[in-house]
Image: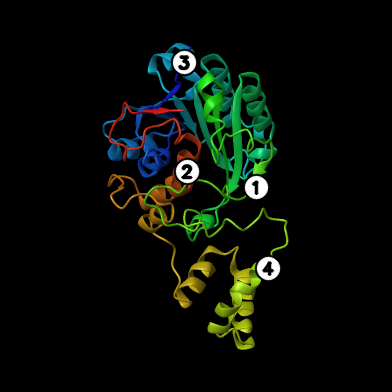
Amino acid sequence: TFSISFVVKLVMRVLELYSGIGGIHCAFEKSTLDYEVVTAIDINDTATLVYRRNFPGTPALNRVLESLSMQELVSMKSDLWSMSPPCQPFTRLGNRKCEADKRTISFTHVLTLITSVQPSFLLLENVKGFEETEPWRQLLDVLDKCGYVYQQFLLTPLQFGIPNCRLRFYLVARRKSASDELVSQTSGHLFSRAKLTNRIHLVPPDDAPALPGCHCPTCLGMTRHITEPGEDFSNYLAYCQPIANFIDMTASHLPTAQQINSLWTSVKNDKESVLTLAQSLGLRFFNSREVASLLCFPPGYSFPELVTEKQRIRLLGNSVNVMVVAHLIYWAFGDVCCSTEEHDPDSRTAV
């Protein structure tokens, strides 16, 4: 007998848990993959207000995740669950009480729901430090027991040409299936057998497909010869010498840096002194539009007028970097999800 196997490319149905102001929704837009966010859920009413303003066609629920039932989630028929749980219990600047912090209760409930519903795909973002906690170990235990394959990363926007060094933990997962056994043999695929590992990747995959239309260092292949941190980088320092020769790096500049550091040490605990020092140096804080741009939110993204500048900054601070997440989405799910550039949501690819 003769048979042909097909991988049916999906229009990815996404459920956003801990949706915040919609950073992951924006990342799906930038990923060029065909998707539909079926529902977004967050406990923060202000974040939900902002979400509804920017995505009026998406049902955005303001409720606690612990109230979600298995039946509700099954009825949504979502393919992928995205989540960015509260980071404060895990942050290096927070209390790091982790599972003892009440804010992790909802995540424990989500793990129960993953076990019951077993969505096809998962995407999680959190702070560096999450990967050293009991909730992280519980997550991996659930993924292993439910038959998921997964990849973990610690990435910074700097690796994508964005002047922001906010290091974040990412996990992408997919449930094993007959079709995945075929897909996993694809050369360069994020979930290929050769790539699957329990270690956490500290750099983007060197053979990751370029995000269509993106000209960042990773997509242009400028980072492909850089190995994981911890290796000898001396061979790469030579490329920095022309820059060092171009910029006047004389000793006369060093006292200025030392003086600023000394001034900062003396005033950092005094808010008024900090503001006075900043004004004298011609410095100011970024406004919310500038912060949104650093996080790669689209130019048309906006906030309701009743949301104060302080609230906007705080909401953005709790959000994701859109560009980094867009790359992860494309790497992890591009082989099973339609691209908007294909124009045919029912396209099928023979394997």
CB atoms at circles 4 and 2 under 8 Å apart?
no
Front in this rendered view, residue 325 or 175: 175
First in residue order: circle 3 vs circle 2: 3
Of the two numbered discs 1 and 2 on the same chain, state the one appearing first in sequence. Answer: 1
Indicate the amino acid at tag 1: Arg
Q: Position of residue 269 (x, y in %)?
A: 60, 63
Please name the residue that numbered disc 4 is placed on. Answer: 235
Query: Residue 1 has which mark?
Result: none
Mark 4 vs mark 1, CA separation in Å:
33 Å
- Cα separation, mark 4 vs mark 2, equals 30 Å
Left or right placement of residue 102 versus residue 319 in this view: right
- Percent x, y for residue 132? 70, 39
Residues at discs 1 and 2 in contact (Cβ within 8 Å): no
Q: Mark 3: which secondary structure?
A: loop
Q: Which residue is mark 1?
A: 92
Query: Marks 3 and 2, how far apart in space?
Result: 41 Å
Between disc 1 and disc 2, the foreground one is 2
Query: Which disc number belongs to residue 325?
Result: 2
Residue 323, percent from left and from top:
44, 49
Mark 1, other Cα within 10 Å: few <14 / some 14–19 / many ≥20: few
**Which residue is tagged 3?**
2
208 shown above or below 162: above
Q: Check disc 2 and give the amino acid type.
A: Val
Using the rendered view, name the quadrant where residue 241 is placed: bottom right
